[in-house]
Image (spheres, coloured by chain):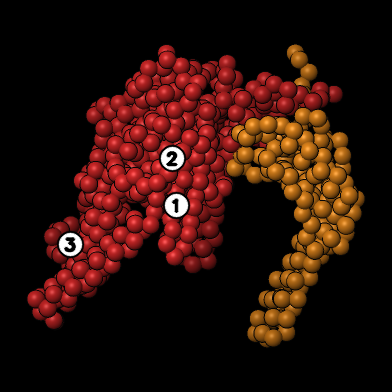
């Protein structure tokens, strides 16, 4: 019997700062929940016990998630660009590998939100003509992202045709 | 047709008649309930006079607006471009390069047909861009036909492809598949909704209920419900037959200059043209009811298909309505030039995929049963009985559907196409052109990883954007993807140690 095949992980990890970036994002959403429920608990006396219980449950789930998810995600997230294709792996529990051939890439964008700015991170979005969603590489260092976008743009411009 | 300088032409002047009559009809239809509703209080004569005045005002206004639109709208077809210009108060110009035109769709509603005009929509088949299409609303029927043939004729068309090669025409025996479609229950339910709505306008809902109750006085509640359901089914069947006739009357699918042309319709006629280069494959779809009658429908997989809009009664991507399987097989084969969709031997998926489906089915049953049981323990024993009845009735149905869904899974590679089959209820077999695959998405959940399964998606520029191969064995699935699109996946595969 032939040996079994599997997908090898893409070559590059994202920037290690991405872990802190994801943690900060989760910390902010945890903070919002605490503030909203806390303020409500102070204001609405009859429901105080229930609101504090909800707050406790939210933190019981939110804090482990805030610590485990980013570390796990960092171990999963990887990307690679070869001569012929872009290859990404994303997710943590649910994982997704995406492959797009260079010749079918239509646009390449880099984005950075305010929080990403703070960590000097960018994400690169690679779209094809498919309506089923783009390839996204999140948590890249500013400069690496810019270089990558530049390189991809050059390669895709060299390919002719409408990439459908 | 008025020819202005430089080839600029006007739309057909009869559009003003069409618009005026459309709005007159709409206004009269809107006014009718008010006339009837207030006739008792204000007198029929007065109400009729007011309504007539309203209809005249609306009609004249609509006609004047359309007259101004018509006077200031011109279009022309040059050697390089199709251009549409509107120049009054607001200036608009839209231009589509001729070599990028991929669709020319002709539609005509009954009024437009009376006046011998048709709407022409010229598109480049690009999904996203704003200026990817322009609409000539309307031109004469002859002009519309001429535009279609002219704009989609390509130099590379060989003489061997005789114009008007017929692929399929309507067979009235297909009518028998119409009542088993989903439209039957929908129309049946809609009929009741309409009765309720209209009677509410006239404050007569109570009277309707009373009349129904008196009509079937001797019947129990169960009997009454049975009668009403039977009535709904009859209305639904009649309605879906009517809808079928309206949509598929004079249906013909043919090849013209290498492109696919489908024309159909009883009252509203339409003629859709699909340029050859947009074709990416076909999908053979067998909804449960239709499948038991050994029939199937054929959809096209092509780039730049419009999303189903509200005023379309059927997806424009349907090339063949439900027809005997042999016909579907032949049409699918003629459209893509290969028997890939129906003759490819598909490989089934691992048993683990079945157990996943059985587990999902049991969760679906467990959720309502547990809720009913908990409420039953807290409130009343009636709910406990409901809980076990639900468990007994729903479990076999859910497990049957799980097995059905598993049996429908399959994938295979043909000469030029990859084939994937899936679906619960509706079984879909898609044959996608292998050169039309523009990437792969491979996903796995923790449960799939434990069972050694992945879900593959072949992404494409056509239709929904991706065709899935659900719950395939990891090794088998990756080898399939690697074989279907050689080279793309190869550098990223490794042998398992």
The image's mark for residue B174 is none
Q: Is residue B248 above or below residue A16?
A: above
Q: Position of residue A34 (x, y in %)?
A: 76, 73
What chain is tagged by disc 2? B
The colour assigned to chain A within the rendered structure: orange
Mark 1 vs mark 3: tell me if same chain. Answer: yes
Pointer 1 residue: B85
Tell me the residue that label 3 is attached to. Answer: B212
Residue at far right of view: A16
- Report how far apart the C-alphas of labels 2 and 3 lie in the structure: 61 Å
Residue denoted by label 2: B77
Discs 1, 3 touching: Cβ within 8 Å: no
Q: Nearer the viewer, mark 1 or mark 3?
A: 1
The reply to whether discs 2 and 1 touch (Cβ–Cβ < 8 Å) is: no
The colour assigned to chain B within the rendered structure? red
Chain for mark 1? B
Asked whether B57 or B10 is in front, the reply is B10
């Amino acid at each position: 019997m032939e040996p079994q095949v599997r997908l090898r992980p893409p070559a590059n990890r994202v920037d290690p700062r991405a872990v802190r970036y994801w943690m900060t994002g989760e910390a902010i959403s945890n903070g919002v929940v605490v503030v909203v429920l806390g303020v409500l608990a102070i204001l609405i006396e009859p429901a105080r016990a229930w609101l504090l219980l909800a707050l406790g449950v939210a933190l019981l789930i939110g804090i482990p998630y805030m610590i485990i998810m980013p570390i796990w995600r960092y171990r999963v997230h990887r990307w690679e660009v070869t001569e012929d294709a872009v290859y990404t792996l994303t997710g943590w529990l649910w994982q997704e590998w995406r492959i797009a051939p260079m010749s079918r890439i239509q646009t390449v964008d880099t984005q950075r939100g305010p929080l990403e700015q703070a960590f000097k991170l960018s994400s690169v979005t690679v779209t094809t003509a498919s309506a089923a969603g783009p390839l996204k590489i999140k948590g890249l260092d500013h400069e690496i992202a810019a270089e990558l976008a530049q390189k991809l743009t050059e390669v895709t411009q060299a390919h002719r045709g409408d990439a459908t | 047709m008025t020819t202005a300088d430089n080839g600029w032409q006007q739309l057909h002047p009869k559009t003003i008649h069409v618009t005026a009559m459309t709005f007159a009809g709409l206004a009269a239809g809107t006014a009718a309930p008010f006339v009837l509703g207030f006739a008792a209080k204000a007198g029929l004569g007065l109400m009729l006079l007011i309504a007539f005045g309203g209809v005249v005002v609306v009609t004249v206004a609509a006609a004047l607006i359309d007259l101004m639109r018509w006077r200031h709208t011109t279009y022309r077809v040059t050697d390089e471009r199709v251009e549409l210009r509107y120049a009054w108060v607001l200036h608009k110009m839209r231009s589509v390069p001729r070599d990028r035109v991929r669709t020319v769709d002709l539609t005509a509603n009954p009024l437009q047909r009376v006046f011998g005009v048709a709407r022409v929509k010229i598109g480049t088949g690009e999904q996203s861009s704003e200026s990817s299409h322009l609409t000539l609303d309307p031109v004469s029927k002859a002009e519309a036909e001429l535009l279609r043939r002219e704009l989609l004729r390509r130099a590379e068309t060989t003489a061997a492809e005789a114009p008007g090669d017929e692929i399929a025409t309507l067979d009235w025996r297909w009518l028998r598949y119409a009542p088993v479609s989903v439209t039957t229950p929908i129309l049946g339910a809609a009929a009741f909704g309409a009765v309720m709505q209209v009677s509410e306008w006239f404050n007569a809902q109570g009277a309707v209920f009373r009349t129904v109750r008196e009509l079937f006085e001797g019947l129990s509640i169960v009997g009454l419900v049975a009668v009403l359901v039977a009535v709904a089914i009859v209305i639904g069947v009649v309605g879906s037959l009517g809808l079928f006739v309206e949509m598929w009357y004079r249906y013909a699918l043919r090849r013209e200059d290498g492109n696919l042309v489908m024309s159909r319709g009883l009252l509203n006629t339409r003629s859709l043209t699909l340029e050859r280069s947009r074709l990416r494959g076909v999908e053979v779809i067998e909804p449960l009811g239709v499948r038991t009658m050994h029939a199937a429908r054929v959809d096209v997989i092509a780039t730049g298909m419009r999303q189903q809009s509200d005023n379309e009664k059927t997806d424009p991507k349907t090339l063949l309505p439900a027809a005997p399987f042999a016909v579907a097989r032949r049409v699918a084969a003629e459209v893509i030039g290969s028997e890939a969709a129906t003759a490819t031997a598909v490989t089934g998926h691992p048993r683990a995929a079945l157990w996943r489906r059985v587990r999902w089915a049991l969760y679906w049953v467990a959720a309502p049963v547990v809720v009913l049981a908990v409420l039953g323990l807290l409130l009343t024993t009636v709910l406990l009985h409901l809980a076990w009845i639900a468990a007994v009735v729903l479990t076999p149905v859910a497990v049957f559907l799980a097995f059905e869904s598993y049996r429908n899974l399959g994938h295979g590679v043909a000469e030029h196409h990859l084939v994937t089959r899936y679906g619960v209820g509706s079984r879909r077999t898609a044959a996608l052109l292998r050169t039309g695959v523009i990437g792969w998405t491979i996903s796995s959940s923790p449960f799939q990883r434990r069972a050694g399964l992945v879900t593959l998606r072949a992404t494409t520029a056509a239709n929904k954007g991706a065709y899935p191969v659900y719950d395939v064995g990891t090794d088998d699935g990756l080898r399939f993807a690697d074989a279907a699109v050689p080279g793309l996946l190869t550098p990223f595969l490794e042998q398992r140690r």
